[in-house]
Image (tube, rainbow, N blue to C red):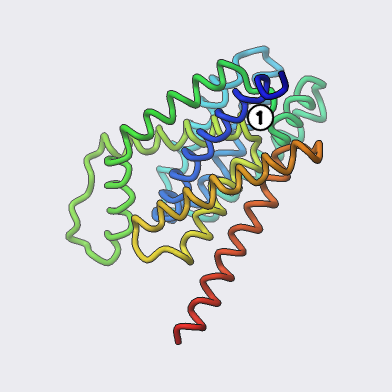
Amino acid sequence: MLGDLLLMPFVAGLLITGVLALAGAGLFLRGSVWQALALGQWAAVGGVVASVLHWPALFVALVLGSSVMALLQRSADRERLPLGVFLAGLAAVTLLAANFSQASLAAASWAEGQLYFAGPNELWAVAVLAVASILLAPGLYRVWRHAQLAPDVPATRPPPTWQRLTEIGWLVAAVVLGSMVLGLPAALATLLLPAWGAAYLARDLRGLFLWTQAIALAGFLIAWSLSLPLDQPFAPVLVLVNVALASGARLAASVYGERNR
């Protein structure tokens, strides 16, 4: 019975991990890591606001996340503005939690994650996003490849506007849904740390995507196998596992480099 109850959360978590890993590799190539922090934090603000207004959490989180992403896309500042927006979102969640009891519970759930309680609605949403990710992958890759090549090869032909807008919309959906299912810290750890570790191991763009997926999925499976027997919340365990795997990838690349000198 326990296995039946946890099968749906397991599949939803595994699928959203793969999507977040793909998004993380793309953010790494775009140099837009700070945008992910701001976007994820305001997705959490949306979820908390929804709990106060008794509105659908996913809808409000998507609206706020999209608004924040639109703001960030209008600025060339890729560090200071996103950091300021992230801190403003953190302050907003804290103030809401301090003044509304429903907001306090919602803030805790977005921080700890609701993976163990993921149901059919979350699974369907994640499954649709996963299928969309596969279908959109060639266009996403073109956008990210241009972001990587353009500074060094100015003549590189840019992707069409609709592909860039599609990539932004897809990224918003991935971060918002990932934060809702895994919890904000775990979603950000899955988004950022596997790509960071993969950068030390990969020799080309294809290798970066493959290593990122391998590290992210391994992190999810290890965290799942540890958190359940130890009766621990999943999100913090996943964060620690991803930190360990990314650090291990960096160490392995350093040791391999020393041996080949």
- Picture coordinates of residue 114 (x, y %)? 68, 28
Q: Is residue 100 left or right of residue 120?
A: right
- Asked whether residue 196 is in view, the answer is yes
- Picture coordinates of residue 141 (x, y %)? 31, 46
Quadrant of residue 225 in the image? top right
Q: Quadrant of the C terminus?
A: bottom left
Who's the residue at 71% across and 36% down the image? 111
**How many labels, in total?**
1
Q: Is residue 150 left or right of residue 85?
A: left
Describe the element under mark 1 as helix, strand or loop: helix
Circle 1 packing at 10 Å, graded few (<14), some (14-19), many (20+), is many
- Picture coordinates of residue 122 (x, y %)? 56, 21
Q: Residue furthest top?
A: 54
- Looking at the rendered structure, the kind of residue marked 1 is Leu
Who's the residue at 66% across and 25% down the image? 6
Tag 1 residue: 115
User: Against 4, is 220 above or below?
Assistant: below
